[in-house]
Amino acid sequence: MDTALSRAPEDARLRFDAILGNQQNVRHLDPEPAPLPISGPLLLDGLILPAAQHDAQEDADVRRREFISTAIAAIGLLQYGGHPVTQPARSCARAVGRGDLEAVREMTSIFSRVDQRRGGGHARTAVVQYLTSDVAAYLRGTYADERVRNEMFSAASELAYLSGWMAFDNAEHSIAQQYYTIAVSLAAEAGDPPMAGHILRAMAHQALDLGHYQKARELATASMDGQRYTLACPRERALFGVVYARTLSTTGQKTAAATALIRAEDDLAAASSDDDEPARVFFFGEASLADQTARTLLNTGDLPGALSEFHRSARTRKAATFTRTHALTLGDLGSVQARSGNIDEACATWSSALDAMDGINSGRARELVTNMRATLSSLQGRGVPDTADLDARAAAYLAAAP
């Protein structure tokens, strides 16, 4: 192997080193999101990736692009279900123009809408394949102008983020961390602070779900810092703010959490469909704000408030478009109803949640159903009617889940 590597071209040696580094990292990854530098140079697989400096020499710019596309190729070779998901990125001989940029954005929009409807377990291999082949090749290309270059790196960042989000939703947490790291690095290279904030917010969300509350607070605080927040559109500011409020509620800062919720509501109220909003925030509206508000209130012990907000979320969400999140909201609403002693209402809500979960492939959904069955098991022992049938439906969902 040493002999073969000594004869291999430089890009092959770089890919080998990056792949080896990723595999070693995967073996030692903790479920807690790995700490990331949030300003200045970014660390990726032990290598420093500088932030964008557009007055740097051309050869440094080329090396930076080569490093990022190589890192994407390496991370794409992580095992998914025991099978490699892609091949190393192709080189791009031609200039990259605005048409190529729009194609990447269109594909990202398609994948994002599939994720919202069907869950992160659907089509993630296709997302990774597209990222590590076509998009990585664009990053190696030459650009019509500097604006196209920056926007392509930003589009690549969004696609890497989506890969991470889908892995997170499917409970593949260490893989999600890898993609989030790539995405933050690409956002830094693009000079796109709101995109970086969007990713840090997602990392905070993951940390919350894993119970790493202090880490979640640090990441959410970073998403709200400086130009990440000030340059974001009002809708994205509201998204950052409501997750930040939720992290405050988990660390005992009830008053600060309430203040952050009010600020997020004001930001969303200032959003307009006429704004030039990035496509990545299309999912965030009243229903999403209500869902995250409910979780914040739940953390502070306000069960009636949480019930009200979960109801508002379920009532206002477009279930046909955002099916996965609608099912999760219904499942959590049922859990709060059960905690409040409203068992009949909880069972009816859980039944609706299972209806909505038909065709959804999501680790978060599977976890919710598993917890549902644990509660139902205790209720069956108390002679509560209809729980046996509901438990059988939940068991069938888990048995059929990939």
Image: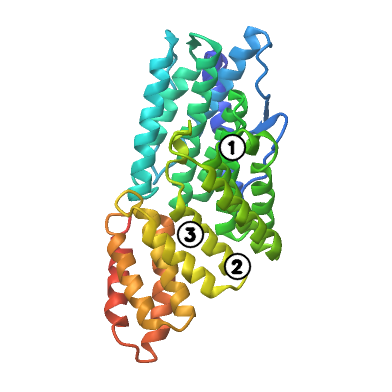
Q: Name above or below for residue 227 compared with residue 245.
A: above
Residue 382 in picture, x, y percent from top left? 39, 91
Task: Give the secondary structure at mark 3.
Answer: helix
Of tags 1 and 3, which is closer to the observer?
3
- The residue labelled by disc 3 is 291
Q: Nearer the viewer, residue 336 or 137?
A: 336
- The residue labelled by disc 1 is 181
Q: Nearer the viewer, residue 136 or 320?
A: 320
Q: Amino acid at mark 3?
A: Asp
Residue 360 in picture, x, y percent from top left? 32, 54
Task: Give the secondary structure at mark 2.
Answer: helix
Residue 146 in picture, x, y percent from top left? 55, 12
Task: Give the CA distance from mark 2 to mark 3.
Answer: 13 Å
Q: Name above or below for residue 194 compared with residue 384.
A: above
Counting residues from the start of the chain, the first of labels 2 and 1 encountered is 1
- The residue labelled by disc 2 is 299
Task: Give the secondary structure at mark 1.
Answer: helix
Of tags 2 and 1, which is closer to the observer?
2
Q: Amino acid at mark 1?
A: Thr
Q: Nearer the viewer, residue 290 or 327?
A: 290
Q: Name above or below for residue 144 compared with residue 393.
A: above
Task: Give the CA distance from mark 1 to mark 3.
Answer: 27 Å
Please give the name of the residue rendered at 69% of the width and 40% of the height, measured from the top-left corner.
Answer: 225
**Label 2: how many residues lie within 10 Å, few (<14), some (14-19) or many (20+)?**
some
Please give the name of the residue rendered at 60% of the width and 73% of the height, measured from the top-left corner.
Answer: 301
Counting residues from the start of the chain, the first of labels 2 and 3 encountered is 3
